[in-house]
């Protein structure tokens, strides 16, 4: 399948800001047991970055944004990258352009991008991505008419007392159907080229996890890791073996929304 790579929806979300929250607590359903290779290598926190993924892990738009701005403001510059899952926009109810994702970006004083999932009537379905610096590039790869993969390399700050910066070749997507997984391989090959070697973090329906794992394995050196799961969706990371998901901690943002902090170590031998 031909892949369409384009810069999209630049005007939808303006530069804004993102971070305050509760202290994280361990989640009972995360993370997976480390593999044998990971056990052989001690966790080097000097090379660890954190990605905050806010999601209800449901098949519906995020309706309650209470606490989102405060969560990101509380994290401050320590949050290099955050994703708000299903930050959908309904154009029939707001024609002024002041949509909730735009307001979040503005109030948190962060740069933002939008990862499109699909158009459904007046509803634009997708995720908001928040980060701390201007980007030189962002790309989107079409999988199907209702599925796109968003790619943007982000400079991340490590979690140590004297942090360093590590470039995370970040990508995100949401998979809701078998047809999307079947059509995914060309996009995965684009993510896996040497100039990208992307770390794909997103959600997939629970019943499609095995299919996604099979698709990921077709790309040499890529591994699928489960971060969090419930009865409906799984939060996953698909990445080269040199990127290892070490820990996932969870903070409750509001009654239905959780913030999952993925601690990812780079350059693992």
Image (cartoon, rainbow, N blue to C red):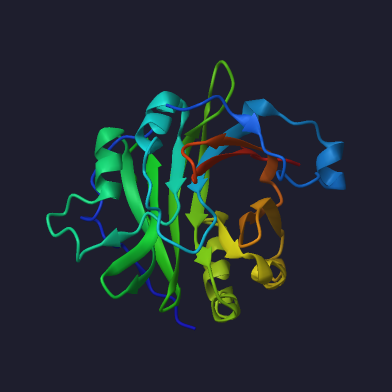
Q: Residue at x 52, y 56 (%)?
A: 196
Q: Position of residue 157 (x, y in %)?
A: 50, 30
Q: Position of residue 92 (x, y in %)?
A: 19, 66
Please, is residue 49 above or below residue 226 in the view?
above
240 and 202: which one is in front?
202
Please, is residue 97 above or below residue 216 in the view?
above
Using residue 258 as the reference point, say whether residue 232 is left or right of it: right
The answer to which image quadrant residue 181 occupies is: bottom right
Using residue 99 as the reference point, say whether residue 192 is left or right of it: right
> How many dots with numbers?
0
The quarter in which the C terminus is drawn is top right
Q: Is residue 150 visible?
A: yes
Q: Residue at x 40, y 53 (%)?
A: 62
Residue that extends furthest to the front in the rendered view of this protein: 255
136 and 209: which one is in front?
209
Q: Position of residue 261 (x, y in %)?
A: 57, 38
Using residue 220 as the reference point, say whether residue 114 is left or right of it: left
62 and 187: which one is in front?
62
Using residue 135 as the reference point, say whether residue 198 is left or right of it: right
Residue that extends furthest to the top in the rendered view of this protein: 161
Q: Residue at x 65, y 65 (%)?
A: 206
Please, is residue 193 above or below residue 179 in the view?
above
Q: Residue at x 33, y 72 (%)?
A: 119
The answer to which image quadrant residue 250 occupies is: top right
Q: Is residue 193 visible?
A: no
Q: Position of residue 215 (x, y in %)?
A: 67, 72
């Amino acid at each position: 399948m031909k892949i369409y790579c384009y810069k999209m929806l630049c005007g939808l979300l303006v530069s804004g800001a993102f971070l305050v929250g509760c202290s994280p607590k361990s989640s009972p359903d995360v993370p997976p047991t480390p593999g044998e290779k990971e056990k052989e290598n001690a966790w080097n926190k000097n090379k660890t970055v954190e990605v905050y993924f806010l999601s209800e892990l449901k098949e519906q738009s995020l309706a309650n944004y209470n606490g989102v701005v405060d969560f990101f403001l509380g994290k401050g510059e320590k949050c290099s990258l955050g994703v708000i899952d299903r930050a959908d926009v309904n154009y029939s109810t707001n024609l002024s352009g002041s949509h909730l994702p735009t307001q979040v970006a503005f109030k948190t004083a962060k740069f933002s991008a939008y990862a499109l999932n699909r158009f459904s009537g007046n509803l634009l379905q997708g995720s908001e991505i928040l980060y701390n610096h201007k980007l030189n590039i962002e790309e989107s790869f079409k999988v199907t008419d209702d599925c796109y993969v968003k790619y943007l390399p982000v400079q991340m700050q490590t979690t140590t007392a004297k942090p360093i910066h590590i470039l995370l070749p970040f990508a995100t997507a949401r998979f809701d159907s078998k047809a999307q997984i079947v059509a995914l391989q060309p996009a995965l090959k684009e993510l896996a080229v040497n100039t990208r070697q992307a770390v794909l973090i997103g959600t997939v329906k629970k019943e499609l996890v095995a299919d996604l794992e099979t698709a990921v394995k077709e790309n040499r050196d890529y591994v699928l890791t489960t971060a969090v799961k419930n009865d409906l969706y799984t939060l996953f990371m698909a990445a080269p073996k040199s990127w290892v998901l070490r820990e996932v901690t969870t903070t409750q943002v509001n009654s239905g929304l959780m913030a999952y902090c993925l601690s990812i170590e780079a350059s693992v031998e």
